[in-house]
Image (tube, grey):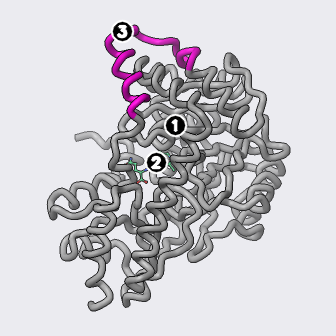
Amino acid sequence: MRSTNATYANLPTTIFETMSRLARHYDAVNLGQGFPDDKGPLDVLQQAANQLLEGSNQYPPMLGIPALRQAVAQHAQRFYGLEVDWQSETLVTSGATEALAAAIFALVEPGDEVVLIEPFYDAYLPLVQRAGATPRFVSLKPPYWRLERADLAAAFSSRTKAVIVNNPMNPTGRVFSTTELDLLAEFATGADAFVIADEVYEHLVFDGASHRSLLSVTGLRDRVIKIGSAGKTFSLTGWKVGYVTAHPTLINLLGKAHQFLTFTTPPNLQAAVAFGLNKQISYFKDLAGDMQRRRDRFVSGLTALGLAPLLCEGTYFANIDITALGADDDEAFCRKLVEERGVAAIPVSAFYRAAPVRSVIRFCFAKQDVVLDAALERLASLRQG
Ligand code: PMP
Ligand code: GLN
C-alpha cells in the first residue's frame, strides 16, 4: 500500500482506550480513562430526551443554537465577570477536542511553533504536527508541577504562534496560581502568541479555590481561545459538546475550520447543555463539592496504604509516585497493576514527549464510593509486594 500520513501512521491507539480495553479483559476496577460513573444530572438528561422527540433534528446553525451560545456568554459573565457578545464571541463544537482541532488548524501555519506544557493531554501533539507546526515543550516535574520562568523562556521564541494551556490540568491535578498565569501571560504577550486555553475542568476546582479563566487575565482578552466542555461540567463525557469563547475575529476564523470538521453538533444535546449552563450556582458548587469528597475518600485511602499521593487541587485525577514501591517504569507498572491486581491506571509518561517522567501513575477518582473502595482494597497488597 502507498505510504500514508506519517503523523497518524506512527501513532499508537490512545492510552485511554488501551487501558479501558485491558480493564475489561482482566475484569479490573477501571480508574484509568477519565470519566465519571454516575448518570449525570437527570434534568439535563430529560431536556435532551424531550428535545430529541419534540425539537428539530435537522442541521442546527453552524456556530451553535442561539440558546446555547447565549448561555455560554452568560456563563462567562456569571463566573468570570466577562462581557461576552454571544453572537460574535461564542462557538459550539463537538466536544473540546473539536474546538482544539479547529483552533490549531485555524491559527497555525506550517513553520510556526506551538508551545505545549507537558504532561499534556494526548490529542494536542498530533493536531499540532498535522497542522505542520513545530512543538516546543515546557516540561513540568513532580511533585509540584510548577511553571518556571526559565522553562518558559527556553520554549518561547519570535516564531511562537500559540501556547496550549490546560488549567485545571490533566493529568497533574494542578490549578495554576495567579503568579503562574501572569507569567504565562507575560510570555504569550511578549511573543504576540495566541493562548489556547483548555479549561474543560473549570468547575472541578477544590478546597474553596475558584477557577481563574485565562480570558480574564490582564492583557489576554483578545488572544485567548477559551474552551469548555459539557462532558466535564455535566458529567456526560459521551455527549461531546464543547464551547468556545474568544474575540470575534478568532471566532470567525475558528468557525471556518469548524464548518469543515463537523459543521455542527446534535441539536437536542445543545439545547440540554444550554439548560445546564443556566442552572443555579448551587449546581456548580455541588459538582465541585461532590468531586472533592471523592478525592478526599480516595486520597486518604491511598495515604493510609502508604502510597504517597501527590497534591490534587482539581480535575478527576490523583497521582502516586511509584518509586516508593521500588518501581521505575510507569507503563510496565500499570500493565502489571491491571493484570495482577485488577486495577487500571494511566502511566503519566503517556502525556510526555520531550522529557518523560516515568515515576508517576494517574488514577481517576470520579467514581462511586464502592468502586473507589474496591480499588483501594486491591491496591492494599501493593505495599506487601
Ligand atoms: N482536554 C482535556 C484536558 C481533557 O481531559 C479532555 C478529556 N475529556 C478533553 C480536552 C476532551 O474533551 P471532550 O470530550 O469535550 O472532547
Ligand atoms: N480525558 C480523558 C482522560 O484524560 C480521556 C478522553 C479520551 O479517552 N479520549 O482520561
Residue at which label 2 appears: 123
- The amino acid beneath tag 2 is Ala
Q: Provide residue 381's location: percent of width, then percent of height.
A: 26, 84
Q: Which residue lies at the image location 48% right of the left edge and 76% below the top edge?
A: 309
Q: Are marks 2 and 1 in contact (CB under 8 Å)?
A: yes
Quarter of the figure with the C terminus? bottom left
Q: Quadrant of residue 347?
A: bottom left
- Ranked by sequence position, the earlier of labels 1 and 3 is 3
- For marks 2 and 1, give the CA distance: 9 Å
Q: Quadrant of residue 45?
A: top left
> Tag 1's secondary structure?
helix
- The amino acid beneath tag 3 is Glu
Q: Which residue lies at the image location 37% right of the left edge and 79% below the top edge?
A: 329
Q: Which residue lies at the image location 64% right of the left edge and 43% below the top edge?
A: 196
Observer-nearest of 94 and 43: 43
Task: Count the numbered circles shown.
Answer: 3
- For marks 1 and 3, give the CA distance: 32 Å
Residue at which label 3 appears: 54
Q: Is mark 1 within 8 Å of ligand 1?
A: no
Mark nearest the camera among 1 and 3 is 3
Q: Provide residue 199's location: percent of width, then percent of height.
A: 60, 45
Residue at which label 1 appears: 101
Quarter of the figure with the N terminus? top left
For residue 43: magenta?
Answer: yes
> Horizontally, is 64 left or right of 192 in the view?
left
Residue 108 seen? no
Up-down relation of residue 156 to residue 92 (above or below): below
> Horizontally, is 188 left or right of 330 in the view?
right
Q: Quadrant of residue 155?
A: bottom right
Q: What are the residue bounds of the magenta stretch? A: 42-67
